[in-house]
Amino acid sequence: ARRRLHVIAGAGVNAQEPTATRRQAGDSWDAGDAYESFMGRWSRLVAAGFVEWLDIAPGGVWLDVGCGTGALTSAICDVADPVAVTGVDPSPEFVAHASDLSCADTADYLVAEASSLPFIDGIFDVAVSGLVLNFVPDPVAALREQSRVVAPSGTVAAFVWDYAEGMRLLRHFWDVAQQITPSAVALDEAVRFPDANPKGLAGLFEAAGLGLAATTDFEVETSFCDFDELWAPFLTGQGPAPSFVARLHDADRALLKEGLAEAMPVDADGSIHLSARAWAIRAKT
């Protein structure tokens, strides 16, 4: 029978009101449909391969930390045949979006912080996070929390974009943005998140007491029928790059759009195809 976990407070839990800690440096995370149009469609492709790579036996109980709009939760339901999945995220709007669309028969969702999970010890078989760990102010504390709520010999795993080199859409964007305004340098995710690579992720897992971690990469293609399709999601205001665009003056926004269009590798039919690489890591508790 399915186990509906939802909020299970008890010993070892340091529960507190969510404080939207992912909203750093002016990032916005409050519109699920807008985020899906910007990044969700690519993260869903990575999520499926990630769940297959974990190779968890059917019937497991999963926790998706920083579930966002439900991309990874959906992949878990589709690929892993779980008995139950609980998704948590600090954004009430993202949780509402995921609740409406993702795995209604198998998944539960609640608003909670990655570093303060409202669950008793050892009740999950697997705890995962997709494109989230780098946004948590204290990723080591978040990983320790995930380890705490996973049973002995369970799995803790995560994946993040390769912001420095492999996520070509964002790499092109920030390279052009830095030509428009110097303030973009500090907001570039490759600068903000220096641990978004195998060595950095392994260091975080080791610091959290999760040794003998395995890493791999997943690469998908981000494709657009034309530049207008590529540019439109940057106007949604969701996530670091669109939040940056929203704060620009009209003239600078126009310059950024023009520069990004010039930087794109456009095929003869006007379509644009860019690779997007994510780094993944897993370890046993």
Image (spheres, rainbow, N blue to C red):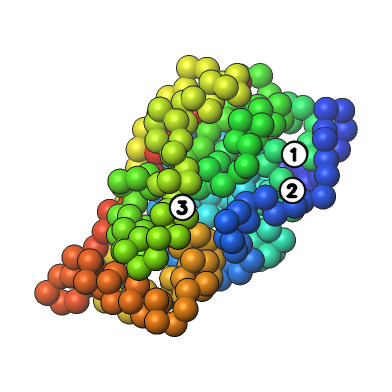
As displayed, is residue 2 above or below residue 97? above
Mark 1 burial class by Cα count in 10 Å: few <14, some 14-19, many 20+? many
**Which residue corresponds to the image point at 36% horizontal and 64% vertical from the top-left?**
177
Towards the viewer: 220 or 178? 178
User: Between disc 1 and disc 3, whose residue precedes?
Assistant: 1
Quarter of the rendering containing residue 123? top right
Which residue appears farthest toward the left when viewing the image? Answer: 268
Horizontal relation, residue 14 to residue 166: left or right: right
For the residue marked with disc 1, what is the amino acid?
Leu
Q: Earlier in the sequence, mark 1 or mark 2?
A: 2
Distance between the Cα atoms at labels 1 and 3? 30 Å
Gap between marks 3 and 2, in whole Å?
28 Å
Nearer the observer, 2 or 257: 257
Residue 150 location, x and y as percent?
67, 28
Which three-letter amino acid code belongs to the residue tagged 2?
A: Ala
- Residue 207's quadrant in the figure? top right
Q: Which residue is mark 2?
A: 112
Report the residue at 79% width, 40% height from top: 118
Label 1, secondary structure: give it: loop
* Viewer can see residue 97: no
